[in-house]
Image: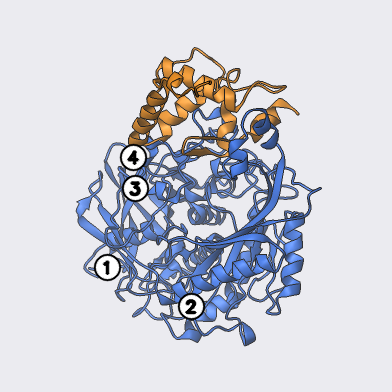
Chain colours: A blue, B orange
Amino acid sequence: MQNKFDAIVVGTGISGGWAAKELTEKGLKTLVLERGRMINHIDDYHTANMDPWDFEGGDTITQEAYKRQPKQSRTGYVNKKSSRHFFVDDLEHPYNDDENKFNWIRGYHVGGRSLTWGRHTYRLSEFDFEANLKDGIAVDWPIRYKDIAPWYDYVEQYIGVQGRLEGLPQFPDGKFLKPFELNVLENHMRQSISKNFNDGRILSNARTAHITEGTKPGLGRVTCQYRNRCMRGCPYGAYFSSNSSTLPAAEATGNMTLMPNSIVHEIIYDEDKKIAKGVRVIDSENNESYEYFAKVIFLCSSAVASTSILMQSKSNRFPNGMGNDSGELGHNLMDHHFQVGASGTFEGFKNKTTYGRKPAGFFIPRFRNLGGKTDRKDFIRGYGYQGGANRGFMSIADSKEELVSYGTRLKENIVKPDEWTASMTAFGEILPYHENKMTLDYNKKDKWGLPTVTFDAKIKENEFAMRKDMKQQAEEMLERSGFKDIYGWESKYVFGNGIHEMGTARMGHDPKTSILNGNNQIHDVKNVYVTDGACMTSAGNQNPSITYMALTARAAKHAVDELNKQNI
Amino acid sequence: MNRRIAIKRIGLSFGSISLSTGVISMIKSCQSPNADLKFFSSTQISFLDRVLEIILPETETPGALSLNLSKFVDSYVSENIRSEDQKYLIAMIDEFTSYDFKIRKPKIN
């Protein structure tokens, strides 16, 4: 097989798919490498049309799954039978988290986590890009909102994002399709919260990457059918995934060579030309090694995996890992802390119920530390809430009265609509702490002889103080919206459980303190771009995928321009 | 009420296991009474059949027996319960079924 290409893209998830599409559409012969197996859109979503009763013994995490996927199981949901095949076997793909528990939740297959992501799409705002500089922590972002805004526009219009325009600076509007409507109780909460708080906070419709009107390019992408089975892969292509959208676009150019089962473990450095010249690959099935060469390399295999590849790419010039002049590679590991919020029941709207299964609820954007009376003394940065309201049915486990009613009375009771309930969970920013890090353990190797990743990260005072406020404000918003039986909760957050790991090869102005420049290039290896979560200088509190897509498209344009100018 | 909708909305609690609305709704898959048992003995299953029929009897909608719900419980317990809990469950069922209820009959004066 041919081993020379114009470009190599490592990874096929959210970022890799975008790199593949942009580079091939600009005419580059591109090799796209994926360590996992092939997943074809629709054909390989074998659980997509299964009803609950089609899963013998229930759609559950089985004892067998707990054995094979002890770490993926910690989430309590990702490896139920309906989506288990999209998450790794922990015995085959081990990592180390003995010091502090870390959840590295991921799937090895074409499409990666673009198939199973949460689909919430919130732009970072100027508050986020300025945050580190203003607070004097970590390093400053080398870009500002204006640099990425047109790329958010571009990406949103291509993938399809539904949302409601609100005109808030901390919650920048985008190019949205019509929103999923709020239901009657969510609407009531929107009104109550605006009326009862004077700090400008609002409840808006969750913004997600679902098509709500018309179609989008890709493999027959049409509007959402309100099934809410997104995590199994969508046969309608209604939410964005690499498999339904960007990879088919790349394929259509005729410029893409997609190779699954190909584990990239090293970038080859050319000591003379001082650029990268290719990658080393192990075939995951027959263990054979290969080398592929290209003019430009896009590392898009997720924060931890991309950083791991850079760490393994040692040369005379870079003895501590490619691009690691600063010693920051693997440090500043971030995620979003959550699992704190509140729920309550609502008396009223007894003559209303819901119809269909809307795959998105509401979002309450950040309302802390935005200046004036929103500023806090106990913590910096902020958080947002994701939640929803619903009218459920009675469950016999819920009350004593129902437990004693069995037989005919039970059958009558359990089909009666229950009260309306609402629930919200906060997602908060984790600061970039140098001490939070990943390293490689060369004593513990995987079945391909590659070093395993060791995590050591925890949240600190700022996050703990924020969590108190996250719980309190959730309770207060429900209270002022007229809820009763309000239950605030906070469970222990395990680092990584937000499945937003990021920051381990951060962008910055200065090669002495960062790995990447403002174009996502490695400072001193200009033909290597890292455009996944590794590049993040701070975390914000927003779900990050849309930012990775925008940065990837922006970097691809930069790379092609640089190639044309013969700068790389 | 439409049977399919009724089935979808049923929730059931068995011992310390609580099943969500979604989990219980796969009773449609339990339609063949002679299917091989994964976990329980036929004695235990006939006990379960009787208990489940008391909880969910046949009315204008199907009951536990006609839906062969014990088959679902068999699969569920086999796949989802830790082995120590399985042992405990079996011990409780055996204790209950071997109990001589006549002893507890109140005396009639």
Q: Residues within 10 Å of mark 2 (few under 14, many from 20)?
A: many
Give the vertical position of B20 relative to A348 (above or below). above
**Quarter residue A521 falls in:** bottom left
Residue indicated by mark 1 = A272
Q: Amino acid at mark 4?
A: Lys
Q: Chain of mark 3?
A: A
Question: For this rendering, which residue is in front, A438 or A192?
Answer: A192
Dot placed on the residue nearer the N-terminal end, 4 or 1: 4
Residue A243 falls in which quadrant of the image? top right
**Residue at 22% in and 48% down:** A449
Whole-number angstrom distance, CA of label 3 to CA of label 1: 26 Å
Query: Comparing marks 1 and 2, which lies closer to the viewer?
Result: 2
Disc with the residue nearer the chain's start (4 vs 3): 4
The numbered mark at residue A494 is: none
Label 4: which residue?
A67
Q: Indicate left or right for A372 with A355 as reference.
A: left
Reading the image, the residue beneath label 2 is A141
Could you give the CA–CA distance between mark 4 and mark 1, rounded to whole angstroms?
A: 49 Å
Indicate the chain on which mark 4 is placed.
Answer: A
Q: Chain of mark 1?
A: A
**Quick one: label 3 or label 2, which is nearer the N terminus?**
2
Q: Nearer the viewer, mark 4 or mark 1?
A: 4
Camera-side mark, 4 or 3: 4
Left or right: residue A104 versus residue A387 is: left
- Whether label 4 touches label 3, CB < 8 Å: no
Query: Do discs 4 and 3 belong to a common subunit?
Result: yes
For the point 54% across and 15% down, the residue is B32
Are labels 2 and 4 on one chain? yes
